[in-house]
Image (cartoon, rainbow, N blue to C red):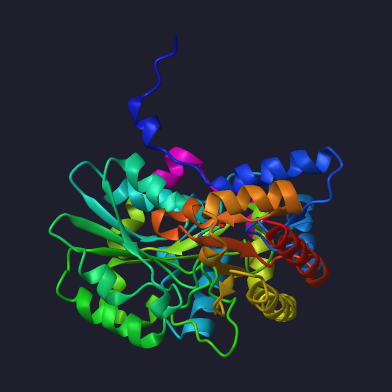
């Protein structure tokens, strides 16, 4: 009998992967499955980025790099953040890691321990709650409501801060809701945080370039008053369709840079070198491919929301960012999990139950529109047929 650590029982998972496994199994049996469950762009990585990765391998970049990333990459990140957010960032505070997730995990390990509290959005990315619990800290969910299109609300966060709060997690544009925090709400959050100088902020801005309908992304980097306690997470996975390359970064407060670098050295030494060179090409090369992908997501978003709103018992608010629609299915009488199962098994459409993102997601379904317009229309029509037959 192996004696695993008790802490493992606190570690959760991401159920989008479970849905994906079932969808793949059904497809392997010959069923026609449309995947609206997955959280990654369906586009390939733009060719000039792929070429840069290949060239790096050909040019002999086969060894370890500095643990925090090659200097050119960190400088390019700082230049990109200056261009997009008008914020001055010291490249020495940028730490490249294998994807967006390691930053979350390291932040939770850095601030979390028994007795500490960490606030995170519900519904929200499932890894937040999982990593908080794993650290031994108490995971304190704050609700996202329809009032603000399921974006984080300053008061919902501020009212839950205690002496024990070490870190708050904010995610905008958000997964699973597509909610975008308006500037006024961010202003209110930052103003309120002045009363809680002991609280650090993890701002997950991985969808920062996926905005629609004239919405603006206001990065927390724009607020100098919180820079000494802000961890700004962003990366390449979604923006440049690079989920499989495993490359991401965060800008850390000065006081945390050594800690996170030691975590990197203990965990993975460095991100694989060719991925870093590919990431460098992504930031310094033409950005047209990003604009084209965002324009395609916007068209799909409109198709998705219109089709969802035509379904009996379903309504869907207009998502402002990311590539998810968060459909309200309460009018169907189905629970989120029942809908997820019914739509996958009977309609051949993979979606993810809102409850996979927290208890507050009950009555909702996450529909990823990272799929073709034709597939989206076909999938939602098939869901409609299943609902009509009940
Ligand atoms: N943050 C959010 C909100 C996400 O939705 C995701 C991926 O789904 C990530 C971070 C992680 O991205 P990565 O694949 O780069 O680890």
265 in magenta: yes
Q: Position of residue 2 (x, y in %)?
A: 44, 13
Q: Is residue 246 visible?
A: yes
The quadrant where residue 375 appears: bottom right
Q: Quadrant of the C terminus?
A: bottom right
Q: Seen from this angle, which residue lies furthest bottom? A: 214
Q: Position of residue 78 (x, y in %)?
A: 49, 74
Q: Is residue 305 above or below residue 238?
A: below
Most foreground residue, 223 or 52:
223
Q: Is residue 216 above or below residue 344?
A: below
Most foreground residue, 38 or 388:
388
Q: Residue at x 27, y 68 (%)?
A: 157
Relative placement, left or right, of 109 versus 195 is right
User: Which residues are the magenta region?
Assistant: 263-276
Q: Seen from this angle, which residue lies furthest top? A: 1
Numbered disc total: 0
Q: Seen from this angle, which residue lies furthest front? A: 390
348 in magenta: no
Q: Residue at x 68, y 67 (%)?
A: 369
Q: Position of residue 81 (x, y in %)?
A: 50, 77
């Amino acid at each position: 009998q192996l004696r695993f650590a008790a802490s493992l029982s606190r570690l959760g998972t991401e159920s989008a992967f479970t849905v994906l496994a079932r969808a793949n199994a059904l497809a392997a049996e010959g069923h026609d499955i449309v995947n609206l469950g997955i959280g990654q762009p369906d586009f390939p990585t733009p060719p000039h980025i792929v070429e840069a990765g290949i060239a790096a391998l050909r040019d002999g970049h086969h060894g370890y790099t500095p643990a925090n990333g090659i200097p050119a990459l960190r400088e390019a990140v700082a230049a990109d953040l200056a261009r997009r957010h008008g914020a001055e960032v010291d490249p020495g505070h940028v730490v490249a890691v294998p994807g967006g997730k390691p930053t979350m995990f390291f932040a939770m390990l850095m601030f979390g321990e028994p007795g500490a509290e960490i606030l995170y959005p519900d519904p929200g990315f499932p890894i937040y709650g999982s990593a908080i619990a794993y650290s031994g800290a108490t995971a304190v969910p704050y609700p996202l409501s329809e009032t603000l299109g399921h974006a984080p609300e300053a008061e919902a966060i501020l009212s839950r801060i205690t002496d024990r709060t070490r870190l708050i997690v904010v995610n905008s544009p958000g997964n699973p809701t597509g909610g975008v925090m308006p500037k006024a709400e961010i202003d209110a959050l930052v103003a309120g945080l002045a009363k809680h100088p002991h609280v650090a902020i993890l701002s997950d801005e991985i969808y920062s370039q996926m905005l629609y309908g004239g919405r603006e992304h206001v990065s927390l980097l724009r607020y100098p008053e919180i820079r000494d306690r802000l961890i700004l997470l962003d990366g390449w996975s979604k923006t440049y369709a690079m989920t499989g390359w495993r490359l991401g970064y965060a800008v850390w407060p000065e006081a945390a840079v050594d800690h996170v670098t030691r975590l990197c050295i203990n965990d993975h030494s460095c991100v694989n070198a060719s991925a870093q060179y590919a990431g460098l090409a992504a930031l310094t090369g033409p950005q047209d491919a990003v604009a084209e992908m965002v324009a395609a997501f916007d068209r799909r978003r409109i198709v998705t929301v219109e089709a969802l709103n035509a379904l009996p018992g379903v309504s869907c608010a207009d998502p402002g960012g990311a590539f998810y629609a968060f459909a309200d299915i309460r009018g169907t009488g189905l629970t989120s999990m029942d809908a997820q199962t019914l739509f996958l098994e009977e309609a051949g459409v993979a979606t993810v139950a809102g409850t996979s993102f927290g208890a507050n997601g009950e009555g909702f379904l996450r529909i990823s529109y990272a799929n073709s317009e034709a597939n989206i229309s076909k999938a939602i029509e098939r869901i409609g047929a299943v609902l009509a037959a009940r």
